[in-house]
Image (spheres, rainbow, N blue to C red):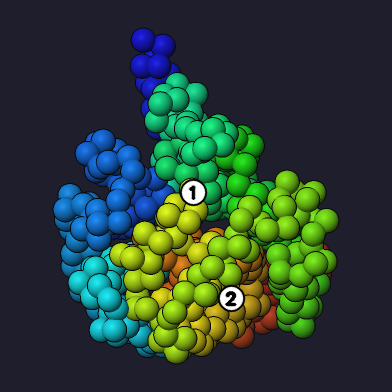
């Protein structure tokens, strides 16, 4: 009976968070709920797993077959999303033309289905990956893309973080478990693994940090304190879950991104692109040195990791020893299937289904061609992120921090995978929303005539008024 009371209390609490975070001055489309549901499923458990219709331990053959129920739900959400995008045809076309590198990468992934040992399975997974892109396009073609991103992160956090606490504390049979053979306790929450729980804490925690820093900097009146209270509660719960998840990769990336968000809000950093590049290069160089070079052995011990990264380095050597096409790979998400999967499951008791390195995972599935195309995606995305930082520091700081966090996270986890929340939000970070010509020209006019508009004001009022006149309208620059 106590667990039922707790469930009602948590449900009311989640409702209160939604009410507090609501901003009546901002309007987003109802279609935004489609990517929310998509990310909620990808960030927790499939519908068949929630209904306990899926086996707790899958065999290699069952992975090939998949779940008809989950497949139908994914196809249904994708179909509804495509219908929404058809009504936004011009904005979608503009968006795709502006991001040719991402489109080329997805097309190559689709072409790789041809040489996969399991073409039907690879094709189904590619369709699901295209669904990820559909969800990103729905968010970025929303009438107010900036507000859509904020609401997407908030809704995702409210629907994943508090329920995880509820399940861990009051439904231990669902939210807790033990590792095979070691019998070490594991806390999973709404997910099926501690690493995935750490990932959603990182995503939702960063969204809360960004909203809080933005709100504190801009100031809030009595009516505007609701979102700050809601985001503060969400951040506190995410930090509590971090302690139980013990996912060091996600926690370190969260801390790294938080520092970057704060640092890039400084005017001295924003106005100096070379300084931004230097900070990013230093962070990435340090991360690579800690993970791959002897320099990081002591640092890894500090954070509770051994030099093998909990067996990851041994797995990396093992997968590279398996015969595979180095130029084109085994096909889209086809390496961990069939005989190769059975071989690694027989060799490792923890039954790996990924390389625990996103770049190595791309190499195994898509070869050096895929790695080169993904590198092109990163270069193109980084340029857009830095430009966004110069154009709109408030939103650009979040985009840059999330971009760097994803690049670092991908060193020890395979995050570039279909139906993966971190990959979806990474795409969202690298893509710019289409700019309305009417609004853009209005913003340009305001910028050119700002000095004339404030010329007659007192000196103490000029700076504040010029900032308000030159600030881009909501939706011009999006995170």
* Residue 457, percent from left and from top: 74, 70
Q: Quadrant of residue 333?
A: bottom left
Q: In the drawing, what numbered circle is on residue 350?
A: 1
Quick one: label 1, few (<14), some, or many (20+) residues within 10 Å?
A: few
> Can residue 444 be seen here?
no
- Asked if residue 309 lies left or right of residue 301, the reply is left
Closer to the camera in the image, 188 or 85? 188
Q: Position of residue 260 (x, y in %)?
A: 71, 62
* Res 385 → quadrant: bottom right
For this rendering, which residue is in front, 477 or 274? Answer: 274
Please name which of the two marks, 1 or 2, marks the residue nearer to the observer.
Answer: 1
Badge 2: residue crowd in 10 Å (few <14, some 14–19, many ≥20): many
**In front of the other: 2 or 363:** 363
Q: Position of residue 440 (x, y in %)?
A: 47, 81
The residue that disc 2 covers is 385
For image coordinates 45% across by 89% down, the residue present is 327
Q: In the rendered image, which quarter contains the N terminus?
A: top left
In the structure shown, which secondary structural element does the residue marked by tag 1 occupy?
A: loop
Please report the residue visible at 75 percent of the width from the left and 73 percent of the height from the top. 285
Q: Is residue 312 visible?
A: yes
Residue 132: image x %, image y %? Answer: 34, 66
Q: Residue at x 62, y 42 (%)?
A: 246
Q: Is residue 312 above or below residue 443?
A: above
| Label 2 secondary element | helix
* Gap between marks 1 and 2 measured at Cα: 38 Å
> What residue do we see at 58% from left, 70% from top?
317
């Amino acid at each position: 009976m106590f667990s039922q009371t707790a469930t009602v209390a948590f449900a009311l609490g989640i409702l209160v968070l939604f009410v507090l975070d609501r901003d009546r001055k901002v309007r987003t489309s109802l279609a935004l709920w489609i990517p929310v549901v998509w990310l909620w499923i990808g960030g927790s458990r499939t519908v068949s797993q929630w209904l306990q219709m899926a086996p707790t331990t899958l065999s290699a053959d069952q992975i090939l077959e998949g779940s008809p129920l989950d497949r139908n739900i994914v196809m249904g959400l994708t179909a509804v999303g495509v219908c929404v995008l058809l009504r936004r045809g011009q904005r979608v076309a503009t968006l795709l033309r502006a991001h040719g590198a991402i489109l080329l990468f997805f097309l190559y992934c689709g072409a790789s289905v041809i040489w996969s040992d399991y073409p039907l399975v690879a094709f189904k997974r590619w369709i699901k990956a295209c669904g990820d892109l559909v969800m990103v396009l729905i968010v970025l073609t929303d009438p107010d893309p900036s507000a859509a991103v904020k609401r997407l992160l908030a809704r995702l956090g409210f629907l994943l973080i508090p329920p995880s606490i509820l399940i861990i504390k009051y439904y231990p049979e669902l939210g807790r478990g033990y590792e095979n053979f070691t019998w070490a306790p594991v806390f999973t929450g709404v997910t099926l693994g501690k690493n995935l729980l750490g990932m959603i804490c990182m995503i939702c925690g960063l969204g809360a940090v960004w909203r809080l820093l933005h709100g504190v900097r801009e100031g809030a009146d009595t009516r505007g304190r609701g979102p700050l209270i809601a985001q503060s509660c969400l951040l506190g719960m995410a930090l509590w879950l971090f302690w139980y998840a013990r996912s060091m990769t996600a926690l370190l990336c969260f801390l790294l991104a938080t520092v970057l968000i704060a640092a890039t809000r400084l005017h001295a950093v924003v106005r100096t692109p070379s300084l931004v590049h230097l900070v990013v290069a230093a962070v990435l160089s340090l991360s690579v040195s800690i993970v791959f070079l002897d320099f990081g052995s002591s640092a890894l011990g500090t954070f509770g990791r051994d030099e093998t990264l909990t067996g990851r380095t041994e797995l990396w050597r093992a997968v590279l020893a398996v015969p595979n096409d180095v130029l084109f790979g085994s096909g889209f998400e086809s390496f961990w299937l069939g005989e190769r999967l059975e071989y690694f499951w027989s060799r490792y008791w923890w039954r790996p289904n990924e390389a625990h390195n996103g770049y190595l995972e791309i190499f195994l599935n898509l070869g050096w061609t895929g790695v080169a195309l993904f590198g092109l995606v990163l270069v193109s995305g980084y340029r857009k992120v830095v430009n966004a930082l110069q154009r709109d520091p408030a939103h650009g700081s979040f985009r840059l921090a999330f971009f760097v966090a994803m690049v670092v996270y991908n060193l020890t986890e395979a995050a570039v995978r279909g139906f993966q929340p971190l990959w979806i939000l990474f795409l969202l970070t690298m893509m710019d929303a289409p700019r309305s010509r009417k609004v853009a020209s209005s913003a340009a006019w305001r910028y050119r005539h700002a000095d004339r508009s404030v010329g007659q004001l007192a000196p103490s009022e000029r700076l504040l008024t010029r900032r308000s006149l030159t600030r881009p309208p909501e939706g011009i620059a999006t995170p």
